[in-house]
Image: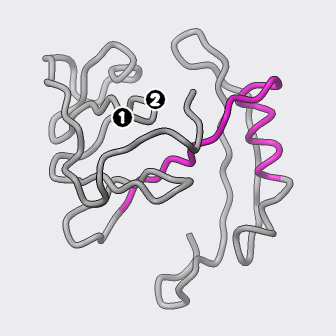
């Protein structure tokens, strides 16, 4: 959806906010309908994606990723911005999986699954790795 050249707000800027709309808490697919569960808000990020972000998280554009950080940076959500691929999300996740050991120390237990989201092609990539900090442990 977006490319690495997308303009973004300054690092540390508050997360762009989209008003909450009432809906069932945590209901599957609620983000696709424009709602967010209690304690979250939908963000329509300038980089071209939408996701539910916990209240209080702030946005940081750190190419090629956009991060949303909890206060104190104790937790983060990250989105890797890249150009669309002709083989779609499944192809993108399979290519990332093939390079997992190159980018993630101790990469293991990787799997890619074809999914759909709101009737559109999607993919899930799950894996474990050692993390960049031994004190943090496997992720």
Give the side of residue 72 with respect to residue 90, left or right. left
- Choose top left, top right, bottom left or bottom right for residue 102: bottom right
Residue named by callout 1: 45
Identify which residue is drawn at 63% across, 41% down.
82
**Residue at the farthest top position:** 119
- Residue 77's place in the image compared with 108, above or below, is above
Q: For the point 68% across and 58% down, which residue is it?
A: 127
Tag 1: Cα neighbours inside 10 Å, few (<14), some, or many (≥20)? some
Can you say which quadrant of the picture contains the C terminus? bottom right
Identity of the residue drawn at 15% across and 24% down: 20
Is 80 magenta? The answer is yes
- Secondary structure of the residue carrying tag 1 is loop
Q: Which residue is mark 2?
A: 48
In terms of image quadrants, where is residue 67?
bottom left
Lateral position of residue 107 relative to residue 37, left or right? right
Q: Quadrant of the N terminus?
A: top right
> Is the residue under label 1 in contact with that under label 2 (CB below 8 Å)?
yes
* Magenta region: 76-97
On screen, residue 69 above or below 50: below
User: Any magenta on residue 96?
Assistant: yes
* Residue 130 percent coordinates (x, y): 64, 78
How many marks the image carries: the answer is 2
């Amino acid at each position: 959806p977006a490319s690495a050249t997308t303009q973004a707000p300054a690092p540390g800027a508050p997360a762009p906010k989209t008003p909450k709309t009432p809906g069932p808490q945590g209901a599957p697919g609620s983000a696709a309908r424009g709602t967010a569960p209690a304690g979250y808000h939908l963000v329509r990020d300038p980089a071209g994606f939408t996701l539910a972000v916990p209240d209080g998280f702030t946005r940081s554009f750190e190419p090629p990723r956009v991060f949303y950080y909890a206060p104190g940076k104790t937790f983060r959500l990250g989105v890797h911005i890249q150009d669309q691929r002709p083989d779609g999300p499944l192809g993108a996740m399979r290519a990332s999986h093939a390079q997992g050991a190159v980018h993630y120390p101790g990469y293991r237990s990787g799997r890619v699954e074809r999914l759909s989201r709101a009737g559109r092609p999607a993919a899930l990539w799950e894996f474990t790795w050692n993390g960049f900090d031994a004190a943090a442990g496997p992720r």
